Every structure is written in C-alpha cells, then in structure tokens.
Amino acid sequence: MPKNRGFLVLLAVMAIVGASGVATVTRAADGTREAKEAIEKANVAFSRAFERGDAGVLAEMYTADAIVFPPDHEMVKGRDAIGEFWKATRDSGVTSATLTTLDVGRSGDVAYEVGTVSLTIQSDGKEATTAMAKYVVVWKRAADGSWKLHRDIWNGLPERK
C-alpha cells in the first residue's frame, strides 16, 4: 500500500503542475496580454485627451451604444451624451484622470478591465485635491481591431488615513 500511495501522490503533483501549465498557456493564447497592452495604451490616450479637455476624442473612444454609469447619476448612453458628460466633468474642475489597470480578462472580442483612477480636482482658483476611485470597464474590439469602451462604471474609494 505505501508504494501505491507514493505513486498516487506523484500523479496528483503531475496533474496539478500540468493543469497550471495549461492555464498559463490558455491565458496567453486567448489574447489577454495583447488586450491588456491595447487597453493600457488606450488609457494613456484617454488621460491625455481628458487633460486637454477634448470631449470629442473621449467620446470616440467608446462604442456607438456605450453606457457610462457614474456614481449617483443617471446612466449616460451613446457617444454624444458621453462626450458631453466628460466635458461637464472637466468643466466642473476635474483637471486630470490617471488610470491604473489592475486586471484584464478576455473572451474573443470582449474584454474586462479592473482598475483605479486618481483624479485631480481644482476649481475656481482653489488648491488642487486628489480623489481616488475604482472602476470596471467592459471593452469591445471594433472592426478595425481597436478596443473601445462599451460599459464604464466606477465609484469612489475611501480617503486614505
């Protein structure tokens, strides 16, 4: 019986190691790394457009039927409305949005992103403050191969003490 037990342990270890190898290969093969790189690049473009106050560029980063879910606000549907939303946000004193991607997953032409955003807020000559939020974005791959924001939701993080 002890010889069988050692053999069973060896088989179990081989199965675990083999399964983890398959998971790694599958994650790489499903294009997640490529999607993450594209999303991180898009986030840099988003931050730059936001800092410039370019609502048109921000709106074009979304799908035509995108929905934004701001906290304590009605849903914002469609590119035009989303562009207006970001213009109003910028006009309210939010001067920058620095996005940090924490996780990306992908299935075909759809990906999700989990991250945080650091917002710089400065209105009417007051001293700048910073607010943090967490977000989830569902991205869709467009016909041209680019990734577009499709569903965008966030809410604030508690202040650090």
Image: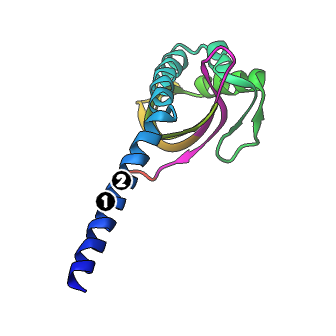
Give the answer, above or below, for where 12 lies relative to 141: below
Q: Which residue is mark 1?
A: 14
Expressed as whole percent of the image width and height from the top left, the position of residue 126 reads 45, 29
Residue drawn at x 64%, y 46% is 71
Give the answer, above or below, for where 48 lies relative to 4: above
Q: Nearer the viewer, residue 155 or 106?
A: 106
Residue drawn at x 77%, y 20% is 80
Q: Magenta: predominant secondary structure element?
A: strand
Distance, label 1 to label 2, CA atoms, is: 6 Å
Q: Are marks 1 and 2 in contact (CB under 8 Å)?
A: yes
Q: Residue 18 bears which disc, if any?
A: 2
Residue 1 visible (yes or no) = yes
Q: Secondary structure at mark 2?
A: helix
Residue drawn at x 42%, y 47% is 22
Number of numbered discs present?
A: 2
Expressed as whole percent of the image width and height from the top left, the position of residue 16 reads 35, 60
Residue drawn at x 32%, y 55% is 17
Q: Amino acid at mark 1?
A: Met
Q: Residue 43 bears which disc, if any?
A: none
Quadrant of the rendering where the N terminus is positioned: bottom left
Q: Amino acid at mark 2?
A: Gly
Left or right side of 9 for 45: right
Give the answer, above or below, for where 41 lies relative to 3: above
Left or right side of 118 for 13: left
The structure's colour scheme is rainbow
Tell me which segment is drawn in magenta: 137-157
Q: Quadrant of residue 130?
A: top left
What crowding class fits label 2: few (fewer than 14 Cα within 10 Å), some (14-19), or many (20 or more)?
few
Residue 161 visible (yes or no) = no
Q: Secondary structure at mark 1?
A: helix
